[in-house]
């Protein structure tokens, strides 16, 4: 049996996230309570039970009363917010739009993956394809601007040591300790720009121009290359499924973009 839980402000705020912020909650099923004429329905009650107790059935009267009390308090706060017209405040309206967008994105991608499930064969084919891909052992020097990166390139051309410059100039403190060494990367790494830049180089070469990523500007040195080394299929099966799923979502968004009229303002 679960102990009686005290309804702290933090817990109440967390419960507000279980459900919507709109006046019409969208709940279904029989009415379990009303607040100032607004209905609270069974589906909302079960959502609270699952969120707090891991089951959609109350195991005793205490759990039932707690769940209903949380729902009533949530409804009271939502109604008070609407009474004050807080849903019209810019920051609140923006957050509501963002939450709605996220829910719709989750729904459409979930439906797409359900309609196009990843089979065992799909995962194995992706595994075999990954094994044929190249990966590169690289070092880098991360700089805050293109100008700073070009200064480092000039120093390298003048004969300065890559390792020494990485230790003194790189913003990536972790790799700087190793003379800029990142290790082996593939095209699914965190910064794929580095992979594609390294792919166009030869072993032992340093990039001719800086490479930009979300982290800044990189001067890259490619040490070695090899076919991708992977763990046994069974150990990474789930990650392969997730990879194929993400690739399918990317294909979906690319297709939608091709069909859409997109105008980007200058």
Image (spheres, rainbow, N blue to C red):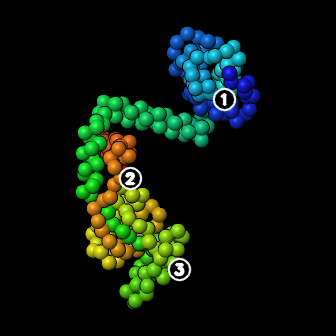
Dot 3 or dot 1, earlier in sequence: 1
Q: CA distance from mark 3 to mark 1?
A: 54 Å
Contact check, label 3 and label 1, Cβ < 8 Å: no
Taking the spot 34% from the left edge, 30% from the top edge, the residue there is 114
Q: Is residue 186 left or right of residue 87?
A: left
- For the residues labelled 2 and 1, the Cα–Cα distance comes to 36 Å
Give the residue drawn at x 74%, y 32%. Answer: 8
Question: Where is residue 60 drawn, in percent x and y?
Answer: 67, 15
Instruction: Give the image quarter of residue 181.
Output: bottom left
257 relative to 137, above or below: above
Q: Residue furthest bottom?
A: 158
Tell me, for residue 81, which label it has, or none.
1
Secondary structure type for disc 1: helix
Q: Nearer the viewer, residue 175 or 246?
A: 175
Mark 2, residue position = 265
Position of the C terminus, as image quadrant, is: bottom left
Question: Quick one: SS at disc 3?
Answer: helix
Q: Which residue is mark 3?
A: 168
Q: Residues within 10 Å of mark 2 (few under 14, many from 20)?
A: few
């Amino acid at each position: 049996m679960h102990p009686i839980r005290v309804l702290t402000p933090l817990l109440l705020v967390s419960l507000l996230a279980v459900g919507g912020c709109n006046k019409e909650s969208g709940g279904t099923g029989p009415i379990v309570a009303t607040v100032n004429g607004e209905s609270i329905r069974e589906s909302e009650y079960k959502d609270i039970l699952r969120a707090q107790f891991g089951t959609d059935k109350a195991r005793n009267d205490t759990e039932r009363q707690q769940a209903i009390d949380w729902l009533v308090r949530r409804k009271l706060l939502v109604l008070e917010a609407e009474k004050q017209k807080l849903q019209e405040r810019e920051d609140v309206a923006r957050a509501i739009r963002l939450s709605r967008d996220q829910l719709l994105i989750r729904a459409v991608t979930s439906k797409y993956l359900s309609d196009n499930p990843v089979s065992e064969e799909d995962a194995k084919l992706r595994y075999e394809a990954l094994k044929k891909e190249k990966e590169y052992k690289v070092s880098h020097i991360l700089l805050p601007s293109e100008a700073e990166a070009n200064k480092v390139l000039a120093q390298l051309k003048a004969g300065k040591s890559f390792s020494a410059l990485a230790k003194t100039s790189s913003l990536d403190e972790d790799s700087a300790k190793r003379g800029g060494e990142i290790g082996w990367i593939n095209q699914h790494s965190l910064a794929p720009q580095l992979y594609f830049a390294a792919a166009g180089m030869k072993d032992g070469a340093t990039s001719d121009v800086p490479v930009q990523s979300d982290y800044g500007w990189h001067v890259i040195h490619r040490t070695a290359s090899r076919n991708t080394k992977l763990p046994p299929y069974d150990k990474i099966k789930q990650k392969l499924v997730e990879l194929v799923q993400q690739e399918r979502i990317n294909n979906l968004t690319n297709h939608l973009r091709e069909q859409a009229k997109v105008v980007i303002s200058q």
